[in-house]
Image: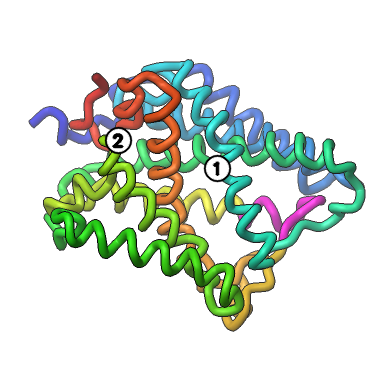
Amino acid sequence: MAQNKDLRGKNKFPWWGWVGLLFVLVFWYLNWHLEGLRTHIGFFPLWLGYCLSIDALTYMRKGNSLISRNLLAYFSLFIVSAPAWWLFELLNEKAQYWHYTHREEFTDVAYFLYASMSFSTVIPAIFGTSEWMGSFRWIQNMASGPRIGNSRSSRLIMLTLGLLMFACLFIYPQYSAAFIWMSLYLILDPLNNILGHRTLIQHTGRGDWKEVIALWVASLICGFFWELWNIYSSPKWYYTVPYVDFWHVFEMPLLGYLGYLPFALELFALYHLLIGFFAKSKWQSYLQILPEVQQN
């Protein structure tokens, strides 16, 4: 089928990709080399540059991308991303797994505004990278895997496990670091199924893990750059995760990178929950991780 062909080289690198690469080069340098506090201003344009660049790579391979298909829907990714990450910040108030330097240098209002601007790039980065990964043949041609979520009882088990994990975050936070990246997905994907919103279990239920794999790989790519660009930034974040705070790759403990895998699935579920309530129904299919997923 034409949808499964490797489309590399069919289209020119679009203009917004060159803008993105310029942003990455300029703000990578500034975030690492300017004296004093600078990353609260430079984080957003650096990651905006990444988002534009990865979208352009996707366009070059597929002939379409998040930006080229629907610019308004692309803006919605930024709008949803900020409150989505603030939810994790709220959970971290109890768990205290990560911390930010120089918090005392900002008023509450300034901190909220700068942080929200930075948080707005998380979902566009993950989704844009997942579409790029989905354009590769090795993901498109993956064999079927286990069927998970194909029955009402399995979805009920997922929901119950998610609720138990979520409760453990508040009761036993010292033992529940992994649950902050797992519980919301296990709760929200079955909930999206009940509400008739787009889910991942509609695919894994029939053994199709392609979208999940693309999201997982995308999360590791983005996670690598988040941690890399953080290392010489100011302000920056650092971690105090019980029992796994060793073998650091940049500031992140090596085992902590596993948290990026379910985190990407949580963002997928959060976005489609919110977009299902507040946006046009056709935006449920806006994200096209695989070529065969067509927009309504």
Question: Percent from the top left, x then y, of residue 218?
Answer: 42, 48
Q: Does 213 sit left or right of 48 as displayed?
A: left
**Callout 2 amino acid:** His
How many discs mark residues in the rendered view? 2
Q: Which residue is mark 2?
A: 197
Q: Does 244 sit left or right of 46 as displayed?
A: left
Viewer-proximal residue among 144 and 172: 172
Q: Which residue is mark 1?
A: 84
For the N terminus, which image quadrant?
top left
Question: Percent from the top left, x then y, of residue 95?
Answer: 64, 67
Task: Give the mark nearer the N terminus: 1 vs 2.
Answer: 1
**Callout 1 amino acid:** Ala
- The residue most toward the left is 1
Give the residues drawn in magenta, as a range. Answer: 227-237
Viewer-proximal residue among 116 and 232: 116
- Between circles 1 and 2, the one closer to the viewer is 2
Q: CA–CA distance between discs 1 and 2?
A: 17 Å
Residue displayed at 51% across by 49% down: 222
Residue displayed at 55% across by 79% down: 175
Compared with 199, 153 (above or below) is below
